[in-house]
Amino acid sequence: MNHAQQKTIDSLLIELESFNKGNIERVDLLNELAYHYSKSKPDSVFYFSNEARMLSEKIEYPKGIADALKNEAIYFYYQSEVNKSFENLDKAISIYKDNDDIKGLSSAYNNYGLIYNSYGNHQEAFKKYEKALAYNLILKDTFSLTRGYVNQANSLSNQSKFDEAKDLYEKGMTLAKKTEDLEQQANIYNGYAIIAERTGEFKEAKASILKAQGIYEKLDLPGNLFITHNNTANINRKQANYVEAIQNFQEALKYANQIGNKRYQGIVYNNIASCWYDLGDNQKALEMYQESVAIAEKIDQRTYMAGISNIALIYSEDKDNLEKLDEALALYKKVETHLLEQETYGELSNTYNNIAKVYLQKEDTITAKANFEKAIKFAEEKSNKYNLTSSYSSLAELSLIKKKYNQAIELGEKSIQIAEELELLKEVINTAEILVSAYEAKENYKKALQYQKRIDQISKDLFNEEKSKEIGRLEAEMEFKAKEQKIRLENEKELLQKEVSLRRQEKINMAFAVGMIAFLIIIILLFKNKRDKEKANKKLQNSQEKIENQNEELKELHHQKNKLFSIISHDLRGPLQSLNSFFEMALQNEISDAELKSMVPEINKNLQRTIILTDNLLNWSSKLVKRQQSKKSSVSILKVTNNVEDLFQTSIDKKYIKLTKIIDEDLKVSAVEDSLDLVIRNLLSNAIKFSDEKGEIEISATQISDNVQVCIKDTGIGMTDNQAKKVFHGELNSVIGTNNEKGSGIGLLLCKDFIEENDGKIWVEKTAPNQGTSICFTLAKAE
C-alpha cells in the first residue's frame, strides 16, 4: 500500500468513528473503505463490506447492499472463488437495475470484465467492458471512459487484435491527457509495450515500459510496478540477456509478495522457470512450471495454459520416450482447445507449430505437415512473422525429403525473406541449407552457390554471436544460482529470527497469565525462559556463522567466475581473432602461398593451445556450476599416455624433445578415464612448454602397495620454492613457456581437483630453477 492510499484510509477510519449509529453515511464509509483496501488487504475488504451489507439490510438501504456485494466479489476473486464473485456481481447488478443506479452498473460490469480477463476469458471480458462503457457514455464520466477504453484495448490485445487495441489505446490516451490521469497514461504505455513485445519490436517495447514505470514509481503503485518489471524481464529473456532478466524477475516477485497477489506469483514462477529452461536445467524448470500451474489453474487460465504448454515443450525433448511425446501432445491439445474457445488465434500459430514438431519426432510427416499448414494460416492472419519463418522452413524441409523441389524452393524463399528481415541468423542458415540442396537437385548450381555463399558469409558472425551468448549464459547461470542461494539463506535467517521472537513472546505471555498464582511458578518459568532464550540465541549464532561461511563461498565463486571470464576474454578470444584475421587475409589474397605455408605451424600451435584451454575452461566451469560426478573404471595408464603423446607429437618434434615412457602395459588404475586423460595431458603440456630444445621428458608409472604412482619429469626451467607452493593451492598463475607459449594456470588446478575426486594425491616431487621439475600423483590400482 502506498503513502497516498494509507493516508486516504486513515482519514476514512477517523471519519468512521464519528458515525457510530447505523445510518446511510456509515454504510457508505464502510463500502468506501472496503474499496480502498481492495488493492492491498483482501481480508479487510471482506470485513468492511460484510459489516456494510448487514447494516444496509437492517436499515433497508439497497445501494449499500449492492456496493457491499460488489466489494465482496473482489474478496472472493482473491480467494480463487470465482463462482462466488460472479454470484455476488449478478446480485449487485440486479439491485442496481431495480434502482436505476447507472454508476453502480458501470462499476459492476467493469469488475465482471476484469475477472473474466484475468481468468483468460477475453471474449466475455470484452462484452462486459462494452456494457460498462455504454453506461459511462450516459454518465459522461471522463475518468471512467478512459478506464473503459483501456480495459477494452487490453482484452483485444490478449486476443491478438492489435490494430483494434491500438485504436482504443489512442482514444484512452486523448482522454487521459485531457484529465491529467497519470495512472491511465502509464497503463496505456504498458499496453503499447505488450503489443510491441508480442510482435517482436523489443526496442519499442522497452521504451514504452520505461515511460510507464517512471509514472508508476512516482505514484507508488506496487501492483503496476510488478507488471513493468515482469514485462521487461520477459523481453530480456527473449534477447538472451539472462542476468538482466533474473534481476527484473526478482523485482517483480518482490512486488507480487508485497501485495500478496497469488496470480502474479504464478506468472513470475512460470517466467523464472523459462529462464532455467533457457539455461539448460530442464528439471529445475519443470519443477517451477508445475508450481506455477498449481497456483494459476483456478485463478488465471492464461498463465495456466502457458505453464502446461511449457511443460509439454520439456516432455517433447525426450525424443526416444513415446509416452512423454504422447503426454506433450495431450497438453498441447488442451491448450489448442482453450485458444479456439477464446478465439486467441495469434497464439494458436505457435501451438500448432509445437504440435507439428512432436508429430515429426513420431515420424508422422502427414499429420506434421497438416499442423504446420494450420500454424502458417493463423500466423499469416495475425502477421506473426516469427512463427511464419519457422513454419515455412519446416514445410520446405518436408518437401525436400519428399523430393518436391519446386515446393521446397517456394517455401524456403518465403522463410528466408522473413528471417533476413527479422535478423534471425540461425533460421537464415537452416533455410539456406535447404535451398542449396533443393537447387542442387534441380541442377541450378548458380542459385545453390549463391545461398552457400550467404551461409559462409553469416557463419562467421553467428559463430562470434553464439560464443558471446554461451559466455553470457554461463555467467547468468552462476549469478542466478548465487542469487538464489543468497535469498534462501536470508529467508532461513528471517524465519529463525521470527521463531526466536515467537518463542520469547510465548514465554512472556505464559508468565503473565500465571504470574499471580505463585512466586515459585514464576521463578521456574523465568528460569525456563532464560534457558530457552540461550538455546535459541545459540541456534541463531550457529546459523549466522553458517550464513557467513556460505556467503564467503559465494564470494569465492564470484571471484573464480571473474577470473574465468578474464581468461576467456584475453587468452581465448586472442587466438580466435588471430585465426580470423589470417583467414580474411587468405580469402583476400593478401598473402602468398609461401607465406601461407610458413604460417601454418604457428596457426597449428595456436589452435592446439586454444583447444586445450577451451577444454580446461569447460571442465572448470562445469565443476564450479554443476559439480558433476562420473563413474570410475579400470583404465590403462599406457593407453592414455600414448593417446596424449599423439596429440602433442608435433610440439615434441618441434623442440626435438626426447620422450621416455617407463610404464608396464598391464598396469591399470581405478579412475574416470576422461579425468586421467585431462591430468596427463595438462602435465605433459606443461613439461613440453617449459622444456628447452633437445630437452628430455620421462613418464613413469610404478606400483606401490595398492596404489600406482605416476611421475612426469622434465629437464626444463623448473620453479622457485614460492612458485611450487602456489601450484596446487587454488591460485590461477599464468607463466610463459620457453617458446613464448601462453597458459592460464587452470590446467593444474583441474589436475588437483580431478585427482582428489578419484581418491588420489598430487604433488611437486622435485624442482629448482634451471634444474627441471618432477610432478607425481597416485591413484588406486585397479582390481
Image: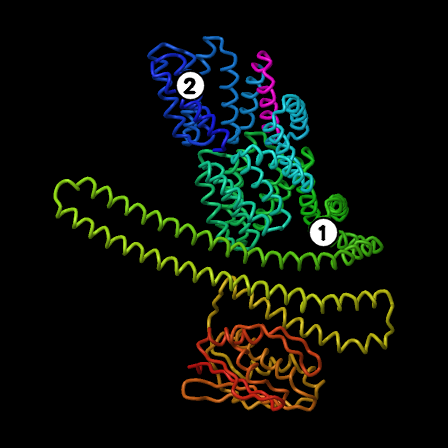
Can you give x and y, in whole percent of width and height, for residue 307 in the image? 51, 42
Q: Specify how the rendered protein is coloured.
A: rainbow
Q: On the image, numbered disc 1 is attached to which residue?
A: 425
Which quarter of the picture shows residue 57? top left
**Is-magenta flag for residue 373?**
no
Q: Mark 2 belongs to which amino acid?
A: Leu
- Whether residue 65 is visible to the viewer of this picture, yes or no, is yes
Q: Mark 2 points at which residue?
A: 29
What's drawn in magenta, residue-wise? 135-157
For image coordinates 35% across by 20% down, the residue present is 51
Q: How far apart are marks 1 and 2 (CA)?
A: 61 Å
Task: Say what secondary structure mark 1 lies in.
Answer: helix
Mark 2 residue crowding within 10 angstroms, few (<14) / some (14–19) / many (20+) = many
- What residue is drawn where x is 38% and y is 26%? 46
Q: Where is residue 778 in the image (x, y as percent from the top left)?
A: 47, 83
537 above or below 417?
A: below
Write the residue at 74% across / 66% down.
577
* Residue closest to the far front: 519
Q: Which of 14 and 198 is in front in this view?
A: 14
Left-right relation of 646 to 91: right
**6 shown above or below 771:** above
Q: In this view, does 361 lie above or below 562?
A: above
594 or 743, nearer to the observer: 743
Label 2: element kind: helix
